[in-house]
Image (spheres, rainbow, N blue to C red):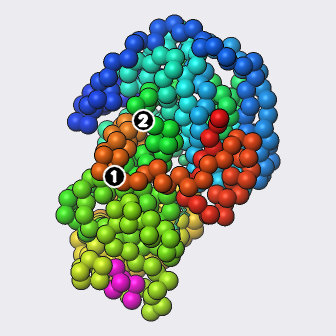
Amino acid sequence: MANSQDIEAIVRQVLESMDARGSSFGSASAPGGYSQASADIPKTAHVAMLTAIGHFDIKEFPIPPVGDDDILVKVEGCGICGTDAHEFKRDPFGLIPVALGHEGTGTIVKMGKNVTKDSAGKPVKVGDKIVTCMIFADDPEITMFDLNKKNIGGADVYGLVPDDEYHLNGWFADYILIRRPGSTFFNVSDLDLDSRILIEPCAVLVHAVERAKSTGILRFNSRVVVQGCGPIGLICIAVLHTMGITQIVAVDGNAQRLEFARKMGATGTVNFKDYSGGIEALAEGVKAQFGGHLADFAFQCTGSPAGHSNIYKFIRNGGGLCELGFFINGGDATINPHFDICSKEITTVGSWVYTLRDYATTFEFLKAAQKIGVPMKELITHKFALKDINEAYEVNLAQKGLKIAIIND
Ligand SMILES: NC(=O)c1ccc[n+]([C@@H]2O[C@H](COP(=O)([O-])OP(=O)(O)OC[C@H]3O[C@@H](n4cnc5c(N)ncnc54)[C@H](O)[C@@H]3O)[C@@H](O)[C@H]2O)c1
Ligand SMILES: [Zn+2]
């Protein structure tokens, strides 16, 4: 296992070699050094602990002493991720009781004397806004440098770690204690609150597009299908659009979501519920949206086995597919290897989470999307106070909105 110094060195090296580096990492802020606590740090923090399946309790814990390598953050907000929803419904990771919330962001209010820079080498000080990132505990180099290698497990991220004596381990809280060395965090003071909450899910799509690019098929003038218009598919469209891809057809069964897909940059939409004639008719519907052509590349952004089976029919011979919809096991899907892959010479890549490099690229993506007017913030359809977190999860599970966020005062 690489230690945190290795991780920091690798991230710094990657960032230095990135074209998109520019202003966000070049801007000078005063080095942190030993930082005094800003005033008004309370003695206790409130944490939404998932104490039973389907139920959070707001617990109060003493704020522990901030060690030399630690950062105390006053939480501003945190998005609810599909993974949190699974944990809420079934506890598949066996973490209960657990402080959830990994799409969070907030303000540094106190930090130890050893903390001077973030994981990208950017100076940090009290008052800066940060996000945390999944730590690739096994070997951070695997997906960072070779996109063709298999992705890894064994990652830890605040919001999905077991409870311990600190308790301040998740972003659904008013304070979180980031313990270093060993934690990956970024100074993102140059992004507004809503953008910071969207970083984590956006990184998933930045990674998926990097995986797609590794096939050599996804190009500037490609015709691209995005199947599934939940937050993941919608952000996928936004990333493709921001990259300059101009022919994007969205497929879903929800008319409202398809309408939203157009706002994100889809140039055509297909509602599968309009096609009763089976997959052949549906494929014709997709083709019609591309002026009589099948797609060069497709992104599968549903957790539906039927969705996986269908998508091959939308892709031309020699085209490519990125399957990213099965973050969790959704069961087997049936395909015909002769018709769907072999005779069509389809190149398929899977995509799972992101790398540290993708995280940094995501900051630039969010700024670029804003510049061209992609209404990313409209993805956050509901905001709840921490005390109303159970209600927020109900709204999330009922799929009444897109991204649901907990926002503190
Ligand atoms: N690869 C990763 O790292 C990663 C990360 C996060 C989430 N995910 C996965 O991405 C998937 C999508 O996430 P989300 O938050 O957008 O979920 P979501 O449930 O909000 O959206 C899925 C969408 O797919 C549509 N859909 C369902 N079946 C369909 C079909 N057969 N054809 C077309 N559309 C269909 C639904 O109407 C819905 O709008 C999830 O299954 C999740 O596990 C993957
Ligand atoms: Zn997540």
Task: Give the numbered dot on residue 373.
Answer: 1
Residue 48 falls left or right of residue 223: right
Span shown in magenta = 281-286
Residue type at tag 2: Leu
* Quarter of the image where one finds residue 167: top right
Q: How dense is the environment of label 1, judged by Cα within 10 Å: few (below 14), some, or many (20 and up)?
A: few
**Given this view, does label 1 or label 2 mark the residue nearer the observer?**
1
Write down the residue under mark 2.
191
For the image, the number of numbered tags is 2
Residue beneath the point at 79% across and 29% down: 60
Residue beneath the point at 63% across and 24% down: 177
* Quarter of the image where one finds residue 374: bottom left
Task: Give the numbered dot on residue 104.
Answer: none
* Quadrant placement of the C terminus: top right
Residue type at tag 1: Gly
Is residue 20 covered in magenta? Answer: no
* In the image, residue 265 above or below residue 85: below
Residue 387: x and y in percent read 75, 42
In front of the other: 343 or 241? 241
CA separation, marks 1 and 2? 15 Å
